[in-house]
Amino acid sequence: MLKGTISLLAVAVAAPAIAAAEAPDAIVVTASRSGDGTKLANLPASVTLIGSEDLVNRQTRILSDVLRDVPGVAVSRTGAIGGLTQIRVRGTEGNHVLVMIDGIKASDPYHGEYDFGTLIADETARVEVLRGQQSSLYGSDAIGGVIQYITLTGREAPGFSARVEGGSFGTVSGGARAAGFTDSFDYAVSASAYRTDGTPTARHGTRDVGSTSVGASAKLNWTPSEILKFTAVGRYSYTDADTNNSESDPTSPWFGYTVDSPGVHFVNKAFYGLARGELTLADGRWTNALTAQIADTRRRGYDEDGFDYGNNGRRYKGAFESAYRFGNEAIEHRLTGAVDFEREEFQNLVDSPYAFTGWRSTSNWGLVGQYELDVNDAFFAGASIRHDFNNRFADVTTWRAQAGYRLPMGLRVRGAYGTGVKNPGFFELFGYSDGKYIGNPNLRPEKSKGWEAGIDQVFGDGLATIGATYFDSRLTDEIYTSYPPPNYVATPSNRTTKSKQQGVEFFLSANPLQQIRFDLAYTWLKARENGVEEVRRPKHVGSLNLTYRSLDERFSTTFTARYNGRQTDVAYTDPSWIPVRVSLKEYVLVNLNAEYRLSEAFTLFGRVENLLDENYEEVFSFATPGRAVYGGVKARF
């Protein structure tokens, strides 16, 4: 059912055609600590690049939506836009994925993971998704992989752009960007906002659950000489989102189900900053970079009586990286060393005499070594190792080795083996909710090891690329929720058994004609925790994106279909608070959008989301929005 009207307000520049997903010439920076970009076609690792053009073609407003198009990725949002949104990669947990924004580690230090519900898409950006164990490069969190969201520089995408749109559910959103460059300086400043009245998220409820999200970003680069470069990044995000609680009255027939909860909402504020200086010597062969960054996150929860809970988290991080390149035209070597320091601070603001509300902290030093080899632009190999010294947990060493070979006809085979680690978060260690949850300060870090093997084929000088990857991983010391007697209050513990994740990732990207492009992704996953199917990780996930553009490039339309197979979740419908396993049905989300360029400056656009009005749940008993229509105009100068 449509709710609200279409508002045709807007101004925004169509983003430039940056490398699209799986394009062979696309450059990826996340897979190396050297600071260099590497061709996607040359990386032995499993990487997906979602380019700026992809974000524009799919009219992406909520960044997590486009991650549904990445092989190996499962997305679950708690009800409405703005609700807690978790990303799971290759069957791992949401806190097993390292998230970076413009090189800044962005996870909430208190919760130990990043909430993608707080990230709305900028006007000009791209996303790199590096799958598999990457702790040897980045330390804790990177068990399932690394997701990096990168805003483009003023040199990459200069000009002014703006966009405003409106539509169903009382939704208004917009964004603006200004960017430019001189010989030695470039800048890019952008801001985005998304406001919606929302829809009911309780199965039998009527309360609309809305949200307001705002994001602002600035990126500056100054190159005073050929050998010296300085970079500064700042980002602020704000989300005020309604939410519904579960019924807590054991006598109610809806006990454990999501119910209308008037006045319940949370506010999340985050600031991220980075400063980097890079010195290049030896005719460009030797680079040295010093980086400092900060992440400051604050979350407050409210009910109809006012403040209910809250937490603060801060992360200070510094890194020194030195990379040396040597060899000849046939054989190229790259050797990188890095030293990382990270200090995380956290505070729980729960109003209870039994909860510690002071600040706690954890510090970590990491030493990294990485070697990369390119032989005749056909054989590629690499290895990395890292040792972490932690003041709270045992020291750990992680490593990874990978290699790939491309035959003359465009066929490439590749493989990798790696290990990973995830330190417990503050909530797991010290969190407290009276009668419901108690943290466990004796938790050990989770550890992972696994391998992958893949094959890719490029046709017609990049007109089409097809590929498949098999992966197999084992997780030990997995942190799970136990209910020990005599009180059976939930508390985290480490498992003594192994958890297993294995699966197949498939993709097909093709641009057979100038007017047509399509991208297909599919994942088959088998994830078992102590022999039992993992929750919120469907066995089958797939997506199709088909874009048509007229010969005069004035009109374009994109059809998107995203399939999410049946999945398991847990429901706390037993008065003892012990979870019951439930099954959530499969669903298909279909979007259709179009745009028409009126002139060089102005473009009209519109889209329909959930075209088939699918009734589905991603999280048990949280209802989701139905069909919605949006429209607007964007401008470019």
Image (tube, rainbow, N blue to C red):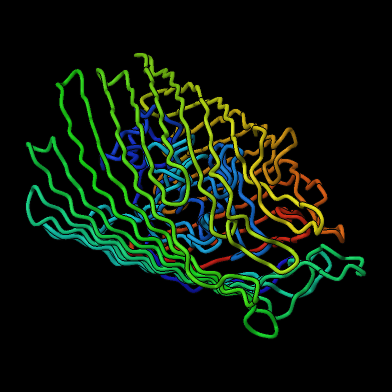
Quadrant in the picture for the N terminus: bottom right
Describe residue 91's horizontal placement relative to residue 49 as left or right: right
Describe residue 129's horizontal placement relative to residue 486 as left or right: left
Give percent across and percent down for residue 470: 56, 25
Location of residue 371 (image quadrant): top left
Q: Residue at x 60, y 45 (%)?
A: 93
- Relative vertical location of residue 290 with respect to residue 38 in this rendering, above or below: below
Describe residue 458's horizontal placement relative to residue 165 as left or right: left
Question: Would residue 313 be seen by someone viewing this image from the given angle?
Answer: yes
Q: Which of 6/264 is in front?
A: 264
- Relative vertical location of residue 210 with respect to residue 476 in this rendering, above or below: below
Residue furthest top in the image: 408
Q: Which of 100/152 is in front?
A: 100
Give percent across and percent down for residue 210: 64, 73
Q: Which of 89/211 is in front?
A: 89
Location of residue 125 (image quadrant): bottom left
Describe residue 41's horizontal placement relative to residue 573 as left or right: left
Q: Residue at x 39, y 63 (%)?
A: 295
Give percent across and percent down for residue 482: 73, 50
Q: Residue at x 68, y 72 (%)?
A: 209
Question: Would residue 165 be seen by someone viewing this image from the given angle?
Answer: no
Location of residue 539 (image quadrant): top right
Give percent across and percent down for residue 343: 38, 58
Residue furthest bottom in the image: 305
Q: Residue at x 71, y 67 (%)?
A: 2
Quadrant in the picture for the C terminus: bottom left
